[in-house]
């Protein structure tokens, strides 16, 4: 008697993972591109004699557009597809960065780095990650959101040291051209490998029901869609809790720690290279914390996660002044590691709540919530600087930020977790 065996085919990797990989590369690059102006400030001052106010204005415009572009980018991705929007965004970054080698006036920098690069990087911000996970993943959504969010920190860790070396060695023009070339190099991968919806390639989202109805692109104008989603969401309490909490998140991270940690450490006698090294450690642990937060978002109530993150962050900020006063390097390193794990861990549960509460509009609503994040960061950056100028120290800024984080804890728990009709 003979037994016939049928060879089993190895399981094919789902197409969603290839889409996530391309998105990771694009978001990684966007983070590096957005952080580049910080490397160029000193070289531009030395060559053109521009004041810090001129260069800072371009950076401020970049930051504002990075946040405010997000909801409109999400709506454009719904209307025209992720592939077209992300490819155009990369081209904007390439043009904006490449043309800086020809600039001769301050308004050129404002237009190129402020407007073009701001619009380009804003279109590849966290709303892109939310859109990818919404369309391509049902299973592992939180984990993939965490990984894509961590790409932002990874991009800065990879690009900034390289660009800093180029700016100090061959010159800032070489650094700008390197950014332009990197952006152009990603375009073919986005165009060939990124697909807007699983149905476009005859499949379904990872973990989705094969009989689920096909989702069609909305026919409404993208700007109208973004504003309509804002008007609808603004009538609900969860939106204000989410936007308020995320504004506090931006204030306590990008606005306060990213901007003022190094000068605050310098006020207490810590060398600037050491303080910069501690911020780099934040970036390293940020990756682990964000991925872990994404994994937890699939298993734990996102409201609870946000409450824990904001609460622990608030307490740590209130301890920071005593650490600076004691100049205790081991204790400060422990703070940096802890703070790094909590840095952008708030993103995956915030995306999950926007998706849960606002359904199909979740990605667009998250774009507006992310805009609040950037506004909070801008206010904190200015407010902490004024506090330092008026009081001669940053202690009030740390305490106020810590108290706001505790307020965000209560706001997170107050969010209703049921999906609206």
Image (cartoon, grey):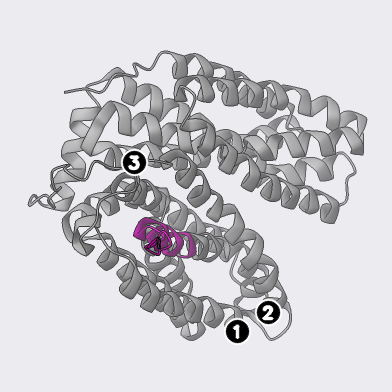
Start-end of magenta stretch? 3-25
Q: Name the image quarter holding residue 89.
A: bottom left
Query: In the rendered image of this protein, does residue 369 appear above or below residue 4?
Result: above
Q: Which marked residue is nearer to the observer: mark 1 or mark 3?
A: 3
Query: In the rendered image of this protein, does residue 20 appear above or below residue 255?
Result: below
Q: Which of 44 and 117 is in front in this view?
A: 117
Q: Distance between the residues labelled 1 and 3?
A: 43 Å
Query: In the rendered image of this protein, does residue 196 appear above or below residue 415?
Result: below
Q: Mark 3 points at which residue?
A: 138
Q: Distance between the residues labelled 2 and 3?
A: 42 Å
Question: Do the residues under discs 2 and 3 have CB atoms within 8 angstroms?
Answer: no
Q: Is mark 3 on a helix, strand or loop?
A: loop
Residue 365 x %, y %: 29, 37
The number of numbered badges drawn on the structure is 3
Q: Label for residue 166? A: 2
Identify the residue at horizontal 83%, vertical 39% (top origin). 333
Q: Mark 1 points at which residue?
A: 174
Identify the residue at horizontal 59%, vertical 26% (top origin). 309
Residue 343 x %, y %: 61, 39
**Furthest-front residue in view?**
1
Q: Name the image quarter holding residue 308.
A: top right
Q: How far apart are marks 1 and 2 (CA)?
A: 6 Å
Q: Label for residue 368? A: none
> How many residues crowd around disc 1 within 10 Å: few (fewer than 14), some, or many (20 or more)?
some
């Amino acid at each position: 008697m003979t037994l016939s065996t049928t060879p089993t085919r190895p399981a094919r990797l789902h197409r969603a993972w290839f889409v996530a990989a391309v998105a990771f590369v694009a978001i990684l690059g966007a983070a590096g591109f957005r952080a580049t102006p910080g490397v160029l400030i000193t070289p531009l001052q030395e060559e053109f004699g521009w004041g810090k106010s001129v260069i800072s204005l371009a950076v401020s415009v970049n930051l504002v557009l990075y946040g405010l572009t997000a909801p409109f980018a999400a709506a454009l991705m719904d209307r025209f597809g992720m592939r077209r929007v992300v490819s155009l965004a990369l081209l904007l970054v390439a043009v904006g960065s490449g043309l800086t080698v020809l600039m001769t006036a301050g308004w050129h920098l404002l237009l190129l780095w402020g407007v073009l690069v701001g619009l380009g990087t804003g279109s590849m911000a966290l709303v892109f990650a939310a859109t990818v996970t919404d369309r391509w993943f049902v299973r592992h959504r939180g984990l993939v959101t965490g990984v894509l969010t961590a790409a932002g920190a990874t991009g800065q860790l990879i690009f900034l040291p390289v660009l800093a070396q180029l700016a100090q060695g061959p010159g800032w023009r070489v650094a700008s051209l390197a950014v332009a070339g990197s952006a152009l190099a990603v375009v073919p991968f986005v165009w060939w490998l990124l697909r807007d919806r699983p149905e476009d390639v005859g499949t379904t989202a990872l973990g989705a029901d094969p009989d689920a109805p096909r989702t069609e692109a909305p026919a409404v104008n993208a700007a109208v869609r973004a504003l309509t989603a804002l008007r609808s969401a603004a009538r609900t309490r969860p939106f204000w809790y989410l936007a308020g909490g995320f504004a506090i998140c931006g204030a306590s991270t990008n606005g306060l720690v990213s901007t003022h940690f190094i000068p605050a450490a310098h006020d207490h006698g810590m060398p600037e290279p050491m303080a910069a090294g501690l911020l780099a450690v934040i970036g390293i642990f940020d990756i682990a914390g964000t991925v872990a937060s994404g994994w937890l978002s699939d298993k734990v109530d996102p409201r609870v996660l946000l409450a824990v993150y904001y609460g622990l962050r608030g307490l740590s900020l209130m301890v920071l002044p005593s650490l600076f006063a004691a100049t205790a390097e081991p204790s400060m390193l422990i703070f940096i590691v802890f703070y790094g794990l909590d840095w952008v861990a708030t993103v995956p549960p915030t995306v999950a709540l926007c998706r849960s509460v606002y359904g199909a509009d979740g990605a667009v609503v998250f774009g507006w919530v992310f805009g609040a994040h950037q506004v909070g960061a801008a206010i904190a950056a200015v407010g902490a600087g004024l506090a330092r100028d008026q009081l001669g120290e940053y202690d009030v800024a740390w305490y106020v930020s810590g108290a706001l984080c505790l307020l965000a804890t209560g706001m997170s728990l107050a969010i209703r977790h049921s999906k609206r009709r």
